[in-house]
Image: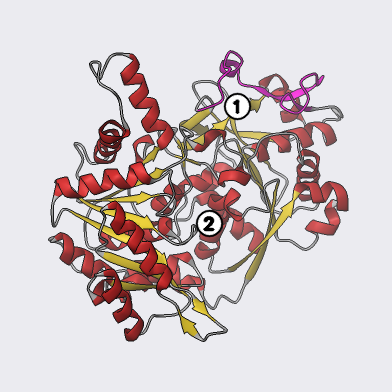
Amino acid sequence: MAKYIFVTGGVVSSLGKGIASASIGKLLESRGLNVALVKCDPYINVDPGTMNPFQHGEVYVTEDGAETDLDLGHYERFTNAKLTKDNNITTGKIYHSVISRERKGGYLGKTVQIIPHITDEIMISIKKVAYGKKVDVVIVEIGGTVGDIESLPFLEAIRQLKLELGKEYAINIHVTLVPYIKTAGEVKTKLTQHSVGRLREIGIIPDIILCRSESHLNNQVKDKIALFCSVDKEAVISAVDVENIYEVPVSLKKEGLDRLIVKLLNLKCAESSLSDWEEKVLKRLDNNEKKVSIAVVGKYITLQDAYKSIYEALAHGAIANNVDLDIKRIDSEDIENQGVDNLLKGVNGILIPGGFGKRGIEGKIDAVKYARENQIPFLGICLGMQVTVIEFARNVCNLKKANSTEFDANTKFSIVSLLEEQKKINALGATMRLGAYECKIKKPSLASSIYKKQKIYERHRHRYEFNNAFKQLLEKKGLVFSGINPGSGLVEIIELAKHPFFIACQFHPEFKSKPDRAHPIFAAFIKAAVE
């Protein structure tokens, strides 16, 4: 039977529960254990697919086409866990399931209540990820902060589940904040005491307290937290700030976290070793002589998490090429107002990520033109590919009014248009072209030299697509259509032959990149930018 680690958070949000959960997964995998990870999100949305990136950050897409929380991206980058729609549970998903069952008479006339019906559904959903699979440990992250009304059903569910599973089959790790007050010159533990107190009121007694802090906690502070929070001193773990998130597993290993987890859960496994991780990732992060500057031209730039996987995949490409990465975050509306040369001059590469809506589109088109004409390595992703074909149609094929029907429904030259199957769809949630689709790569091409194979599968999230009615015209003018979906004929990859590096794809390669296994497109893009 799988064993469970429930990760909760207290005091404030953004303490890094997702990174902590992913790092724990990495540590347990290094001991030869198989892990599964689950994120429980308290919001009532069924999934984050309809949320504005400014509200929620990036929507991470799994192989099976689920739109999920961005923490699942951390899980896949740090571990070998294969995630699906079952690995992200939301309040909306739980209530939708329970209410649908009630409407069909599934509760046989009973009054449907939060306890036991909602909490039972949460427990069933959590346990589902281990059914019929070789899973040793399931790591369950509860979103939000202890004390939030929204997360109470999830906390009650894990309280019940921990009781059901029994000792040595489930533990709680509580992530909290231990701030340093500069004016007092002291580390303060009271916030952690109150947070653990709130957790205990709910009926959950933490087995380990993971203390986020600016520096390592001394023995006196650990003794105090252990005494007032009723845990062993060895269970008070310093989770200190690090320069790079990929240092976290090593930092937690030095604190003995994995050893303590193994002891509490009575796991039979090998000793942990992160030597490969340190060799392939951490050593390559430091002391690089070369530096590469990449401009990311987007429309949600002000929110760090909006392009989380993009930034991480660029970092992976830099690790693969032994260079330091400098990301210049450029708002495409600023390009429209200040001019492209003022903002992009001097960069080594330009990347345009995905997005929706008309705002900032002309700035993105200007950035594509700048990269094409100035021979700057360029990578376009999803919307980035769509603005690339619009720019080429306007400025090379002389179709001056070329556009996407997303931005101009009456455009004469609809270079990008709504997918045929999308025209009859009215609902917005989970209705896009989502998940992994096949792409057949033309040979010879830049894409084939990058992938070194002719058949690939990449993850998608879009409603609009290149209009094949214009394919022949753009090919005559030099645009190469190097990747095609064999079933539908939809264009997946475009490129320019007479350019140092110019490629754009309809899919999202960033979702399949890892720090020790950079996605080949990002590794090649950074290599070209360095050169």
Foreground pick, 91 / 33: 91
- Residue 78 point in image, percent of width and height: 39, 57
In reply to whether residue 525 is colored magenta, the answer given is no
Foreground: 176 or 23? 176
Q: Vertically, is 351 above or below 315?
A: above
Please indicate, yes or no, whether residue 441 appears anywhere in the rendered image: no
> Circle 1 — which element?
loop
> Would residue 52 be found to the left or right of residue 120 on screen?
right
Which amino acid, mark 1? Arg
- Examine the rendered structure and indicate whether residue 496 appears above or below residue 111: below
What residue is rendered at 33% in x and 26% in y?
A: 98
Give neighbour class at mark 2: few <14, some 14-19, many 20+ (Cα, 10 Å): many
Q: Earlier in the sequence, mark 1 or mark 2?
A: 2
Q: CA distance from mark 1 to mark 2?
A: 25 Å
- Say if 298 sits above or below 229 in the image: above
Query: Which portion, as a residue range, is magenta?
Result: 403-429
Q: What residue sits right under mark 1 in the picture?
A: 463
Q: Position of residue 151 (x, y in %)?
A: 40, 45
- Where residue 134 appears, as percent x and y from the top left, is 19, 44
Residue at 32% over, 75% down:
225
Tell me the chief SS of the magenta region: loop
Q: Is residue 304 left or right of residue 171?
A: right
For badge 2, the amino acid type reads Glu
Which label belongs to residue 312?
2
